Amino acid sequence: MEDKQIDKEGMLPVGTTLSNGKYKVETYLSSGGFGNTYVAIDTAFDERVAIKELYIKGVCGRLADSASISISLTENQRTFAAQQEKFRKEARRLRKLVNPHIIRVHDLFDENGTSYYVMDLVDGESLSQRLKRTGKPMTEQELMLILPQVLDALETVHAEGIHHLDLKPANIMLDRKGNALLIDFGASKQLRNSDGNSLSTSSALAYTPGFAPSEQMEQNIEKFGPWTDLYALGATMYNLLTRNQPPSPSDIDEDAEAALPMPATISKKTRDLIFWLMKPNRKMRPQSVADVKQFLVEVPTRQPQAEKPKEAPKPSDEKDDTLLKGGKSKGGTSSSDSKKKGGENGGGKKGMTYLVAVIAVVLIGGGVAALSQSRCGGRNERAGLDTLDTTTVDTMATYVTDQKIAVENGPENMRTYTYTGNVDAEGLPQGEGKAQFAAYGNIPAATYEGHFVDGICTGQGKLVFTSGDSFEGILDGGFYKEGIYRLSDGSYFQGTFKSGSPWSGTWYNASGQKDGSVKDGKE
């Protein structure tokens, strides 16, 4: 930690107090061309925070034995005054962006002849630091746990008429449980005023080569939009999956396949998404985060399977325990019908023989509330990912095989299971693992393989039941969130879920043809 102690020219000395003693500087965190960031103690609450200070290299100096900055040249004073106003606007923009995946600003004040703002201190690392530390690219599964969180943050940013304009691995932080936070809005610009009219600027906009599309490189503000950040998102995904520097838009325009080489292990869908996001022509990219989310839940085009020429069984061939569209088996009322009467099935088009039973397996009941403080923290730790090496985090260092796990807060059908994977110091599954759940009443036995947080199925995973039903996608605190639920007859629902039931998406028959839709939980 010695290299982080503040004994460098231009830095605030350790122990400096700010804002009338409210904050006490503890150590140096990072610096750039326009600012220094420190770790400080909020003395009122005895909490560690990050404080960003406006300090322009080549313009600002620090008086000897003083925290105050000095600016000698008149021209530099004008430059500093302009940047100070931008600095304050940056803090105010961040303050408006309330989202668990966006760094939160708590305070803004002027002191020592400059400005400061106070942010959450993230106990973790940036994605670029992670790549350097591990020396290898992310897996596709790891990336797909982070991507929904970044999309959630961008959706909030764009809804405020703001664009980040510097999205890259260095500006995405992961805390120790893998929760992603978007940081550094120094390049962001509010591109419309309260009347919805376009704003203009005479100042040059900084950008990071490889992560900026052509309209940003050309400083063509009138052509900026959500698609500008989405290009950077594609470049970020490419960099994380390959560790390659993203190419220029002109190279992609000449030959996208050659410019964006990816390992054969990367799925076609993810490759297609990156190619789409990084289209040089902005009009050919996704135009909004919603477009990307829709792409992620769409069913890939089915390839012909000669060995299975008849995928859709005829009604006369269906077994007695197979549900028809009306939600009843040919042999009588199903268990899911009785659940639907209680309003638990969300009005899904199919009866889904085991859907409600599955919900009973994956919902944690009272455990959800219990986890809201230790895991969710107001959605601050949603969809966790064990991204840190076991050599750096002792609590994530134990790998177990076929261990019996007991979860105190879970319902009876989920309180015990056999588990193989990573566990923390308390023996709770954390990160990637595999669980075997025994049959419970009318609920069939199941196997879950995927991500865990505090012993709960959370993140990307796959749940397969001995009945033949399965779910693959993202779970949040034990709930189905987004993905595909397949019935044993081959039909399936693709989309989003609410309280474990289909909420928005499409039903398909066994041949992959559309067979109905669900919106807001209704057919």
Image (cartoon, rainbow, N blue to C red):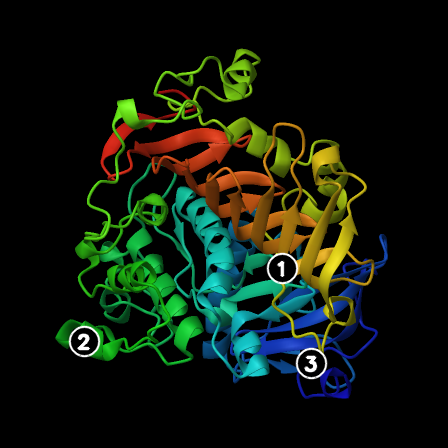
Give the answer, above or below, for where 509 lies relative to 198. Answer: above
Q: At x 56% / y 34%, what residue is drawn?
A: 358
In which image quadrant can residue 234 be found? bottom left
Is 217 rendered above or below residue 431? below
Q: Nearer the viewer, residue 256 or 73?
A: 256
**Residue 140, x across and y down, in percent:** 44, 65
Q: CA distance from mark 2 to mark 3?
A: 41 Å
Q: Kindly identify the residue that appears in the image at 60 percent across and 49 percent down.
A: 458
User: Do tag 1 and tag 3 residues touch (Cβ < 8 Å)?
Assistant: no
- According to the picture, the residue beneath numbered tag 1 turns out to be 433
For mark 2, what is the residue?
250
Gap between marks 1 and 2 measured at Cα: 42 Å
Is residue 522 toward the left or the right of residue 95 in the image? left
State the SS at label 3. Answer: loop
Mark 1: few, some, or many residues within 10 Å (few <14, many ≥20)? many
User: Would you say 519 lies left or right of 465 here?
Assistant: left
Q: Earlier in the sequence, mark 2 or mark 3?
A: 3
Give the image location of residue 398, x and y in percent.
75, 69
N-terminal of the pair, mark 1 or mark 3, is 3
Disc 3 residue type (three-letter): Met
Image height check: is 498 above or below 266? above
Tag on residue 299? none
Corner quadrant of residue 488: top left
Earlier along the polypeptide chain: callout 1 or callout 2?
A: 2
Q: Which residue is mark 3?
A: 11
Type of the residue with mark 1: Gly
